[in-house]
Image (cartoon, grey):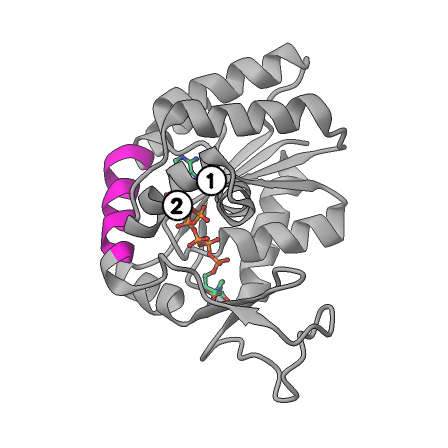
Amino acid sequence: MNIILLGPPGAGKGTQARRLVDERNMVQLSTGDMLRAAKDSGTEMGKLVAEVMAKGLLVTDEIVIGLIEEQLETVEATGFIFDGFPRTLAQADALNALLGRKGQSLDAVIEMKVNDDALVSRVTGRSTCGACGEVYHDETKPQPADGKCSNCGASEFKRRADDNEDAFRTRLLAYYRDTSPLIGYYYAKGQHSAIDGMAAMDAVAGEIKEVLDKA
Ligand code: AP5
């Protein structure tokens, strides 16, 4: 089963993707994580994208499609969760072609709807475990009091360079301008479902399960 989690910055895509990996043995393909890894490794491509990401702008289609293509060619999985990809119509067309080449297709595109006002506090309050990537939030899911990640026990936590209000506004604009047309695109293809991303994390997971059970 191949699915897309679609939604604005801070909608909860990464949080829910990690649960699906644990519960359904699927593979999460997050272009944001791939780009951050490239940035941290100091490759030429990493240097190129670091500034673009810090400002909240979109990285070029060519780069992100290349990253996804490489993963689809090398990783075997019973199902992929596309998290943060596609983000443009060109990326969506490329994904169809890449899956088609593997004899596969998309089973569901789940739009996570969250109020704009809630997004900014979700993003500015976010931190992640530096070792396993577990996602925390200063108010809704605080880091454990003993300073150790509840998932892996590591004690180093990170905040993202683009998780500030200025970069967030740019990311939100990019979402409405470049990514939100995908809602209509997948609706017309009969693949779109919308869920309430404002609900508590367990309730959101329940709604995703309902969509996947019907797909
Ligand atoms: P990316 O890393 O994909 O970031 P994003 O799409 O902006 O999404 P986020 O990771 O910010 O949010 P999320 O929806 O995963 O939310 P999370 O679960 O963490 O992209 C970063 C940058 O990389 C882009 O700006 C761009 O430059 C570049 N890029 C990436 N992909 C690209 C592409 N395809 N094309 C071009 N450029 C690309 O949750 C957020 C917070 O909310 C957490 O603290 C969490 O604990 C909390 N939370 C989650 N769910 C709930 C809930 N139900 N209730 C309350 N709190 C919740």
When the figure is inspected, residue 148 is found, relative to residue 190, above or below; the finding is below
Q: Secondary structure at mark 2?
A: helix
Q: CA distance from mark 2 to mark 1?
A: 6 Å
When the figure is inspected, residue 74 is found, relative to residue 6, above or below; the finding is above
Please name the residue shown 67% across and 15% down the image. Answer: 102
Q: Where does the N terminus fall, quadrant-wise?
A: top right
For this orientation, the residue located farthest to the bottom is 145
Hey, what amino acid is under mark 2? Ala
Quarter of the view holding residue 16: bottom right
Q: Main secondary structure of the magenta part?
A: helix
When the figure is inspected, residue 14 is found, relative to residue 74, above or below; the finding is below
Quarter of the view holding residue 152: bottom right
Q: Secondary structure at mark 1?
A: helix
When the figure is inspected, residue 103 is found, relative to residue 65, above or below; the finding is above
Per the rendering, the mark at residue 46 is 1
| Label 2 sits on residue | 50
In this picture, residue 30 sits left or right of residue 116: right
At which x and y percent is residue 131? 66, 63
Please give the range of residues in magenta. Answer: 167-179
Closest to the observer: 79 or 43? 43
Please name the residue shown 65% across and 25% down the image. Answer: 72
Q: Is the residue under label 1 in contact with that under label 2 (CB below 8 Å)?
A: yes
Is residue 175 found inside the magenta-colored segment of the image?
yes
